Image (cartoon, rainbow, N blue to C red):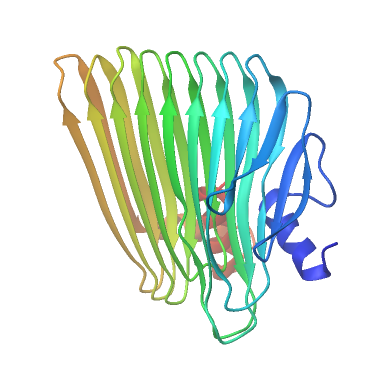
Amino acid sequence: MMDAIQKELLMQIADLHGVPAGAYNFRVNGEGAGRNTTEHIDIVTKTDKPGIDIIIKPGTKNESVHIPVVLSQTGLKEVVYNDFYIGEDCDVTIIAGCGIHNSGDLDSQHDGIHTFFVGKNSRVKYVEKHYGEGDGRGSRVLNPQTIVHIEEGGRLEMDTVQIKGVDSTVRVTKADLAADANLVIREKIMTHGTQYAKTDFTVDLNGEGCGADVVSRSVAKGESRQEFISVINGNNRCTGHTECDAILMDNGKVLATPALSANHLDASLIHEAAIGKIAGEQIIKLMTLGLTEEEAEQQIVSGFLK
């Protein structure tokens, strides 16, 4: 059973108002709080360290797995290891994420280390949301690490969102792709106050005909700081694209470091980065429609992060 705060966190990170259909594993304040498996998806508790193994049988189609984490106990710090074994010819959706409510004086922290083994010709949609709240002086810290191995013809689409309440985060993603594999990453981050967010992507395009598309959109408000590092290594005939778009507001700061390494004659790689404040004409145009300056800014930011 979850209390009202925990249920609100669950709704924020996984859009859940109750028990989801399909396979799921709930983790609340460092303990298991509910689990369901299906004919094609098994979830097994690790015996050597905190975490679970999610095993998806070959040929599984149109099924989902929810693995949300909720922390409402101030001062709780944990590292959790979740491994995903996706068999060949699958088409599945995985919804993860962590919500922290901290109303105390001690820091609360969750570091989720997720490793994906995507089988041949499988398609995986991975959604990860991070959220923080609470009026305590203790920080809300999230440091996710994602390691991705995609076999021949496999595809992973990864959507990550962090737009409220996380005081410090270092997000590390490492991926290697075999022939004709694809990786698509869409990241959205907003920081405010004195928050800090760092993103570090490294993608190795090893197989012939593989490709990666990495796009980050972020807004830095107040005195917050962000860093974006993206490295794509083209080690075969492949395509790679990395892009960082950021809006600065107040005294926010953003450092973008996209890097490309073409190690094969037929590696085709592109990087883009754009950082700046909201254009004055955009605000004026919306104000002519009856919005205040603050409402206009909110509308622009909302559309940018949509």
The spot of residue 1 in percent (x, y) is 85, 62
How far across and how far down the image is residue 49, in percent? 53, 52
Q: How many marks?
A: 0
Answer left or right for 170 relative to 236.
right
Residue lying at 61% horizontally and 57% vertically, measured from the top left: 98
User: Where residue 119 appears, x then y in whole percent?
Assistant: 51, 19
Image position of 94 (left or right of 10) = left
Q: Is residue 188 above or below residue 222?
A: above
**121 and 16: which is toward the camera:** 121
Residue at 23% across / 21% down in the picture? 268
The image position of residue 88, as x and y in percent, is 56, 15
User: Could you say which is closer to the camera, residue 296 or residue 7?
Assistant: 7
Look at the picture and state if 107 lies above or below 238: below
- Name the one closer to the observer, 55 or 19: 55
Q: Quadrant of residue 296?
A: bottom right
* Residue 41 horizontal side relative to residue 85, left or right: right
